[in-house]
Image (tube, rainbow, N blue to C red):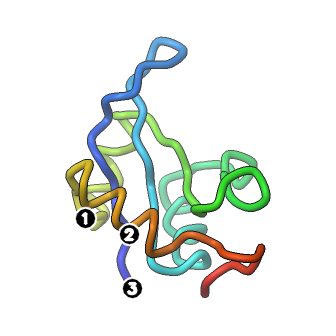
């Protein structure tokens, strides 16, 4: 299993943000917990089709130190498509 982050390029609320994704939703939640990210920050079905967390650039740096794989925009889009939930069922 792997966890992925893209570049922190999205400006909002005075911070730069990026996406944290994983091959497995349970792994995503475990990794977010390691980072100290609240479960209430999780974004997934039915709001969005790809289970993920939006994290700050600071949290991204910590995620990379913990083993998250850095991805380009193209790579993270491919991962979004791969982990996307179809018909409301989460991939595990």
SS assignment at label 3: loop
Residue 90 lies, with reference to residue 41, above or below; the image says below
Query: Which residue is outermost to the front?
Result: 87
Residue indicated by mark 1: 69
Viewer-proximal residue among 86 and 70: 86
Residue 47 lies, with reference to residue 51, above or below; the image says above
> Distance between the Cα atoms at labels 3 and 1?
11 Å
Q: Residue at (48%, 41%) from the top-left corner?
A: 55
Q: Residue at (38%, 69%) from the top-left corner?
A: 3
Residue indicated by mark 2: 3
Asked if the residue at tag 3 contacts the one at tag 2, i.e. Cβ–Cβ closer than 8 Å, the answer is yes
Query: Which residue is outermost to the top?
Result: 14
SS assignment at label 2: strand
SS assignment at label 1: strand
Q: Residues within 10 Å of mark 1 (few under 14, many from 20)?
A: some
Residue 66 lies, with reference to residue 72, above or below; the image says below
Q: Which mark is residue 16?
A: none
């Amino acid at each position: 299993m792997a966890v992925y982050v893209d570049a922190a390029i999205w400006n909002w609320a005075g911070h730069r943000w990026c996406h944290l994704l994983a091959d497995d939703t349970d792994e995503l939640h475990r990794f977010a917990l390691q980072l100290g990210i609240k479960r209430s920050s999780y974004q997934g079905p039915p709001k969005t089709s790809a289970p993920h967390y939006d994290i700050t650039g600071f949290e991204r740096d910590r995620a990379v130190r913990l083993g998250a794989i850095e991805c380009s925009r193209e790579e993270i889009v491919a991962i979004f498509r791969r982990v996307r939930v179809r018909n409301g069922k989460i991939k595990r």
